[in-house]
Image (cartoon, rainbow, N blue to C red):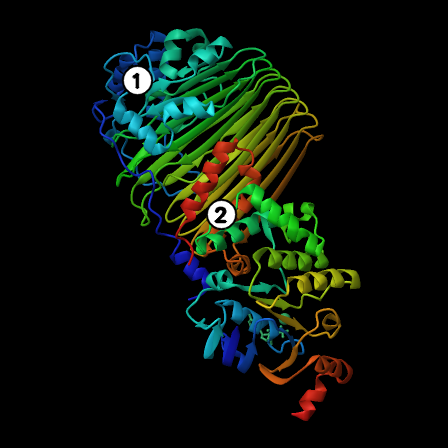
C-alpha cells in the first residue's frame, strides 16, 4: 500500500528526514517510535503532502502511484488520513460542517452523489458511537475550547467518517487519560480491516498495549534505525532510546 | 513560493458574475449637474412644489459643501458634471401586471436570479425592483395593503401619501447631513417607501433589488421606512451592477423611523461591480443610512454583507432616542484586489437604558484596504446605557490592509462601553487541516471565511444567508493556491 524509499525531506535549510525507508501493506499496523524531535511528525506531514516541507530525494508510493506531484487534498481523497498531533481550531466551523464538506467533496471526486442532510446525519450517528462522542461537541466550532482528550477523539471520529485506506495517527495517545485511551484505541481497532492499514506514531509504549502493532520501527535522526515486532517497543520502554544509539 | 504568496497570487482571478448590461429603451438626462437638471428630475416625476423646493434648497447647500476627506480611502477625483443624473426606462404606459413588464427586463431579473414571477409564487418575497432609478414592478401590493402596509416606489409615495413622506423625509438624514446625502437630496431619482401601521407585523420580507444599468448614470435612490407603534418589518436590499470600465457613482440615502415598541430589521447584500483585478472600473458607493429609534422599546437592526464596489463609504447608524431602545449593527465587509472599504456604524445613545451592539467582520485580500470606523456616543441623560463592540479583521496575504477606528465618547457615568478587536490571518495550519480531509483550497477558504463571518451571516434571513455565503466565496475565489 505504502512504499517509502530513501526519503529525504527538509524545511528551509534544516534537513529532517535523511534517507528513510518504510513499507506498509494492507491489513498491517505499524508503530513508529522515536525520541522528541526525531522527525516523526515530519514524516507524517510529508506523507500527507504538506507543502512546507521539501522532499529533496527519494519517493513515496501509495497504491502504486508516486505521490510527488499530488497535492495534499488529492492524497486525502485517495485515502490517506492524518490524525493530527495538534488538531487545528477553525472558529465558526463545526465538526459537522467540516465533515460534511469533506465527505461530500470526496464523494464528488469519485463521481458519487453528495449525501443529503438525512443520510449524512445517519452516517454521523453511526460513527459517533465508535468513539463515544456527543452531538453537542460536533456542533461546536471544531477544536475550539476542546479538552486534549476531546480533540483526539474528534480526530478518530473524523477518521471513522472518512474511512481511509491509510491512517497515520500522530501521538494520538498524548494527553489522554486511561479511559479516553481505551475509547480511542477501541475506535481505531474497530476500524481496522484487511483492506486498510494504520501507522501509529508515538513515543510511549503504553498505547501499543491497546493498539497492537505488527511492526515497530525506531526513528532516530531522520532515519529508521531499527525495526522489529511488538517486543521491540517493550524493550525500548525498558532500556530507553540510548540503548539503540549505543548499539549503533 | 510560500503558501501565503500562493494564496495571494491566486486570489485575483475571479470574474464578476453579474457583468452584463441590457439595452432598454432609455430616457436619459444630458450630463451635468445644475439647477435645471434638478428641476427636470422633479418635473419628470410630477412632484409637488414642496419637494422641488426641498431639492433646490439641498442643491444650493451642496454647492457650498466639500467632499469629505476624513476617511481612510483614496478617492479619485469625481467629475460631477460628467455624470447623467437621470435615466428612466421609457414607460410606454402604466403597468398593471407583470405581463406588461418589458421582456428584456424580466430577462434581467432572471439573470439576476430574481425572476419576479418565481419570487411571487415561491418565496413570498415582495419585490420592488429598481433598475436605473425608476421603480418598475411591485408585487404583493394587494396582500400588503389589506394590512394597511404601504410598500411602493418613492415617487408613487410622494404622489399618493404626500403627508407621510413630507412628515418623515429628511428628518433622520437632513439634506445637509453630508456631501453625498446632500447630493442625493437634490437629485434622487427613486427608491422605495415603506409604512407599517400600528401593531402590524409585516408577514413577509420586503425586498428591493437595486441595480445600476445605463453607463454614466449615477444612481441616487432614496429609501424611507416608517414603522409605526408596535409594528415589525424585515427589509432586504440586494444590489448588483453590470461590469463597466469606467467608474460609476452611487450615493443612496436610507432613513428609518421606529416608533414605540416597533422593530425594523434592515439587511443588505451588496455585490456591485468591484472593478477588475487591476483596479479598473467599479462602483463608488457612498451611502448614508440612518435610523432613529424614536419611541421607547423600539429597535433597529442593520445587517450588511458588503462584497462589491470599488469604494465603499458607508456607516449605517442608529439614534437611540427612546428609552430602552436597541440598535444593532452586524457587518461583513470583504475586499479583494484593489477594492477599498471604509465602513462601520454610529450608535448615538440619547434615551435611558439604551443598548447597542456592533459586530464587524472585515476580510481583506489582494491589495485591498478595509477599514472599520465606528462611533459610540453616550449622551448625558442616557443613564445605564450599554454598548458592546466587536471588530475583527481577517487578512489573506500581506499586501492588503485592515484598519480599525473606534471612537468612543461617553458623557454618562452609569453607562458602559466594551470594545474588543482582533486581527488574524487565515493560518496555513487551518488550510492544511482542511486539505488533509480532502477539501480543496477554494472550499477551504470558503469554509474558514464563512466560519469567521458566521455571527453576522446568521442574522440574515435564510435565503439571503445562503446567497451571502456564496458571494463571500465568490469574492475570494481564485485567491488561493
Ligand atoms: N517548521 C519547522 N521549522 C523548523 N524546524 C522544524 C519545523 N518543524 C519541525 N522542525 C524540526 O524538525 C525536527 C523534527 O520535528 P518533528 O518531526 O516534529 O519531530 P517529532 O514529531 O519526532 O517530535 C525537530 O528538530 C524540529 O525542531
Ligand atoms: Mg511529533
Asked whether, in this view, residue A29 is left or right of residue B433, the answer is right
Write down the residue under mark 2. A114
* Residue A239: quarter of image: bottom right
Nearer to us in this view, A111 or A168 = A111
Q: Are marks 1 and 2 on the same chain?
A: no
Real-space CA distance between mark 1 and mark 2, rounded to the nearest whole angstrom: 39 Å
- Residue B102 vertical placement versus B316 (above, below): above
Ligand 1 found in image quarter: bottom right
On-image quarter of the C terminus of chain B: bottom left
Disc 2 is attached to a residue of which chain?
A: A
Write down the residue under mark 1. B99
On-image quarter of the N terminus of chain B: bottom left
Label 1: few (<14), some (14–19) or many (≥20) C-alpha neighbours in 10 Å: few
Q: Position of residue B462 (x, y in %)?
A: 52, 32
Label 2: few (<14), some (14–19) or many (≥20) C-alpha neighbours in 10 Å: some
Q: Position of residue A226 (x, y in %)?
A: 64, 85
- Closer to viewer: mark 1 or mark 2: 2
Circle 1 sits in a helix, a strand or a loop, which is it? helix
Q: Position of residue B397 (x, y in %)?
A: 45, 56
Residue A144 in view of the camera: no
* Residue B246: quarter of image: top left
- The extreme bottom residue here reads A247
Asked whether, in this view, residue B433 is left or right of residue B243, the answer is right
Q: Position of residue B455 (x, y in %)?
A: 58, 39
Nearer to us in this view, B110 or B324 = B110
Circle 2 sits in a helix, a strand or a loop, which is it? loop
Q: Residue at x 61, y 23 (%)?
A: B350
Asked whether, in this view, residue B372 is left or right of residue A96, the answer is left
Amino acid at each position: 500500500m505504502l512504499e517509502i524509499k530513501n526519503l529525504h525531506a527538509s524545511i528551509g535549510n534544516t534537513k529532517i528526514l535523511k534517507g528513510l525507508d518504510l513499507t506498509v501493506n494492507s491489513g498491517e499496523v505499524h508503530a513508529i517510535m522515536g525520541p522528541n524531535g526525531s522527525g516523526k511528525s515530519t514524516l507524517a506531514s510529508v506523507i500527507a503532502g504538506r507543502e512546507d516541507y521539501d522532499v529533496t530525494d527519494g519517493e513515496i508510493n501509495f497504491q502504486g502511484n508516486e505521490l510527488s506531484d499530488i497535492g495534499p487534498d488529492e492524497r486525502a481523497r485517495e485515502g490517506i488520513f492524518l490524525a493530527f498531533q495538534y488538531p487545528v481550531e477553525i472558529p465558526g466551523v463545526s465538526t459537522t460542517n467540516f465533515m460534511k464538506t469533506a465527505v461530500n467533496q470526496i464523494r464528488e471526486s469519485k463521481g458519487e452523489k453528495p449525501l443529503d442532510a438525512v443520510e449524512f446525519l445517519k452516517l454521523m450517528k453511526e460513527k459517533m458511537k465508535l468513539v463515544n462522542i456527543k452531538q453537542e461537541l460536533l456542533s461546536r466550532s471544531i477544536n475550539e475550547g476542546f479538552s486534549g482528550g476531546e480533540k483526539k477523539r474528534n480526530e478518530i471520529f473524523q477518521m471513522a467518517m472518512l474511512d481511509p485506506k491509510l491512517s497515520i495517527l500522530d501521538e494520538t495517545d498524548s494527553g489522554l487519560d486511561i479511559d479516553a485511551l481505551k475509547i480511542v484505541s477501541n475506535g481505531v481497532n474497530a476500524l481496522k480491516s484487511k483492506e486498510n492499514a494504520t501507522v501509529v506514531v508515538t513515543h510511549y509504549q503504553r498505547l501499543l498495549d491497546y493498539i497492537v502493532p505488527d511492526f515497530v520501527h525506531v526513528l532516530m535522526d531522520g532515519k529508521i534505525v531499527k525495526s522489529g515486532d511488538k517486543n521491540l517497543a517493550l524493550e525500548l520502554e525498558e532500556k530507553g532510546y540510548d540503548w539503540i544509539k549505543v548499539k549503533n | 513560493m510560500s503558501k501565503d504568496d500562493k494564496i495571494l497570487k491566486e486570489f485575483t482571478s475571479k470574474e464578476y458574475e453579474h457583468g452584463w448590461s441590457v439595452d432598454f429603451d432609455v430616457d436619459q438626462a444630458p450630463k451635468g449637474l445644475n439647477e435645471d437638471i434638478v428641476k427636470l428630475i422633479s418635473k419628470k416625476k410630477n412632484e409637488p412644489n414642496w419637494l422641488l423646493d426641498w431639492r433646490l434648497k439641498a442643491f444650493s447647500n451642496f454647492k457650498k459643501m466639500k467632499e469629505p476627506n476624513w476617511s481612510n480611502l483614496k478617492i479619485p477625483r469625481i467629475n460631477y458634471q460628467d455624470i447623467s443624473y437621470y435615466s428612466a426606462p421609457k414607460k410606454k404606459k402604466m403597468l398593471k401586471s407583470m405581463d406588461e413588464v418589458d421582456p428584456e427586463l424580466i430577462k434581467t431579473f432572471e439573470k439576476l436570479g430574481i425572476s419576479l414571477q418565481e419570487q411571487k409564487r415561491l418565496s413570498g418575497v415582495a419585490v420592488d425592483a429598481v433598475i436605473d432609478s425608476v421603480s418598475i414592478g411591485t408585487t404583493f401590493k394587494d396582500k400588503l395593503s389589506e394590512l394597511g402596509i404601504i410598500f411602493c416606489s418613492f415617487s408613487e409615495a410622494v404622489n399618493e401619501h404626500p403627508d407621510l413622506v413630507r412628515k418623515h423625509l429628511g428628518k433622520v438624514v437632513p439634506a445637509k447631513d453630508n456631501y453625498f446625502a446632500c447630493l442625493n437630496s437634490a437629485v434622487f431619482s427613486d427608491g422605495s417607501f415603506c409604512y407599517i401601521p400600528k401593531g402590524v407585523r409585516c408577514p413577509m420580507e420586503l425586498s428591493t433589488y437595486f441595480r445600476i444599468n445605463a453607463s454614466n448614470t449615477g444612481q441616487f435612490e432614496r429609501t424611507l421606512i416608517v414603522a409605526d407603534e408596535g409594528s415589525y418589518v424585515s427589509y432586504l436590499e440586494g444590489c448588483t451592477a453590470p461590469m463597466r470600465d469606467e467608474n460609476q457613482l452611487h450615493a443612496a440615502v436610507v432613513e428609518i423611523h421606529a416608533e414605540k415598541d416597533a422593530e425594523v430589521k434592515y439587511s443588505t447584500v451588496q455585490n456591485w461591480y468591484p472593478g477588475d483585478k487591476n483596479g479598473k472600473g467599479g462602483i463608488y458607493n457612498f451611502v448614508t443610512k440612518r435610523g432613529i429609534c424614536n419611541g421607547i422599546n423600539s429597535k433597529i437592526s442593520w445587517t450588511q454583507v458588503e462584497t462589491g464596489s470599488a469604494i465603499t463609504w458607508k456607516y449605517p447608524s442608529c439614534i437611540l432616542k427612546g428609552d430602552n431602545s436597541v440598535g444593532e449593527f452586524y457587518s461583513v465587509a470583504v475586499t479583494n484586489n484593489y477594492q477599498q472599504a471604509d465602513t462601520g456604524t454610529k450608535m448615538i445613545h440619547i434615551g435611558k437604558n439604551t443598548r447597542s451592539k456592533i459586530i464587524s467582520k472585515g476580510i481583506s485580500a489582494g491589495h485591498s484596504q478595509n477599514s472599520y470606523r465606528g462611533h459610540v456616543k453616550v449622551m448625558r441623560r442616557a443613564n445605564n446605557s450599554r454598548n458592546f463592540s466587536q471588530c475583527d479583521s481577517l487578512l489573506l496575504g500581506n499586501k492588503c490592509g485592515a484598519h480599525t477606528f473606534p471612537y468612543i465618547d461617553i458623557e454618562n457615568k452609569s453607562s458602559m462601553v466594551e470594545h474588543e478587536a482582533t486581527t488574524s490571518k487565515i493560518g496555513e495550519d487551518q488550510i492544511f487541516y482542511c486539505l488533509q480531509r480532502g477539501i480543496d483550497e477554494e472550499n477551504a477558504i470558503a469554509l474558514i471565511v464563512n466560519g469567521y463571518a458566521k455571527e453576522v451571516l446568521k442574522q440574515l434571513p435564510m435565503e439571503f444567508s445562503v446567497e451571502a455565503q456564496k458571494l463571500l466565496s465568490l469574492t475570494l475565489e481564485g485567491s488561493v493556491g
